[in-house]
Structures are given as C-alpha cells and as structure tokens.
Amino acid sequence: GAGVSQSPRYKVAKRGQDVALRCDPISGHVSLFWYQQALGQGPEFLTYFQNEAQLDKSGLPSDRFFAERPEGSVSTLKIQRTQQEDSAVYLCASSLVGSVAGEGADTQYFGPGTRLTVL
Amino acid sequence: AQSVTQLDSHVSVSEGTPVLLRCNYSSSYSPSLFWYVQHPNKGLQLLLKYTSAATLVKGINGFEAEFKKSETSFHLTKPSAHMSDAAEYFCVVSGFGSNYQLIWGAGTKLIIKP
C-alpha cells in the first residue's frame, strides 16, 4: 500500500474487555514496530518484529499485552482485560530493515494510530 | 544509554519569522538523530534524519537541523514560519550499529501566530 494503515482509528472499551488493534505495514517492509503514546508525551517502544519473528518485546507493559505477525506482514496488538491506564494512542511503524550498517536505525514510517479509550 | 531532551514544551512564533526548536541528546556513541512532526489527528511524519554524513541536514518543508557533537545538540530551524507548520515536533535518537530502537523526546508544540 501507499503507507502504513491501522484499524480501527478509534476504540472505546469497557474496563476488562479484550481489544485487538491491527496494523498493515508498507508492502515489502521487513521490520514492524508498535509504540504507545500517552497524552502529551512522545511514543514509547512496545515491541519489534523482523518478518514474523518477534525479536524484542521488552517494552510491553504487562502480560496482558500480546503482539503477533504470523505471516510477516499484517500485525495485531492484543490487550486483554483492558485497564484505564491502557488508554493511549497505539502507533504502528514499519521500515525496510531494522537498522542500517554504519547508520543506526532505518527510517520508520508511521501509521495514523489507534486511539484507545478504556472506560 | 541514550536519552533526548527537548528544551521547550511550547514555542510560539509569528508567521513569517524564524523557528528554532531545541534538542539535546545524550549518547555513549555516535547516534542517528531524527526529527518527526505530528499534526493533529495525523500520523508521525519524518522531517529529516542525521546519520554520519553532513552535519547540516536539510529536510522537507524548508526545515533543517545541525548536528553539533561538541554541544550534543540537534536543533531544528526554519527561516520563515508558515501557518501550516503548527504541530507537535519530536526529536528522536537511536543507537549506532544494530540498535533499531528509537528514543523519543517529550515533544515541542509549535504555535504560529497570524
């Protein structure tokens, strides 16, 4: 596709519900990232995939958070038993590779995000 | 460990006047540095990226940033502000080599006065 797409754009959940957020990366991009952005703050890293392999999940805040990318393309971030503190914008980004030798992080392209509100 | 500090949470300028958004970083080795812009209800867009080439980096929409190692700074500038520049701006640092993680500043909200 032309860019990274995410769905839904907005999600309201009652506390305790499970939610699933979808990310469609740019076609051909190997790397996929999930971030959480709280109101008035910069994004914070959640997890990283290279193709279908989840290479880093160090940023996931609890075991209620789970991400997958089974075929190395579309990814889903699942949050179980949502809590009010989970309310945030969840951003997905993709890059052609994870990092470039001698240059550090490859450019990441971001989707519009999913705004999750937990009541 | 890397970190990044954006020195101003809000910057207000008049249309047609210069813009300066300040960013300082901390890194134990030569980092990659980025500026991203976030317009309301829109995704993050890359403005420019510094790797290890020229210290003055030109980006989109007339923005540029200068990498100053001695000052550990990567300030973003634009000679003449436009109303469409009103947005949130993030300074971002990553590690050298295989470090794919991005460390984000808290953001600077740019306000353009007519």
Image: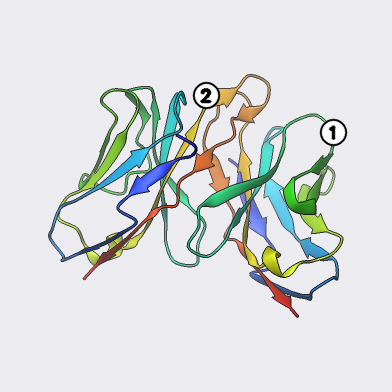
At 85% from the left edge and 44% from the top edge, which residue is drawn?
Answer: B70
**Kind of residue at disc 1:** Ala
Is B104 displayed left or right of B81 in the figure? left
Secondary structure beneath label 2: loop
Label 1 and label 2: CA atoms lie apart by 23 Å
Is B82 displayed left or right of A74 in the figure? right
Q: Quadrant of residue B106?
A: bottom right
The residue beneath circle 1 is B54
Looking at the image, the residue that sits furthest to the bottom is B114
Secondary structure beneath label 1: loop
Looking at the image, the residue that sits furthest to the top is A101
Does residue B98 show up? no
The residue beneath circle 2 is A97
Q: Position of residue B82 (x, y in %)?
A: 76, 67
- Looking at the image, is B113 positioned above or below residue B70? below
At 76% from the left edge and 49% from the top edge, which residue is drawn?
Answer: B74
| B85 and B99: which is toward the camera | B85
Please give the chain letter of the residue carrying mark 2: A
Label 2 packing within 10 angstroms: few (<14), some (14-19), many (20+)? some
Does residue B114 show up? yes
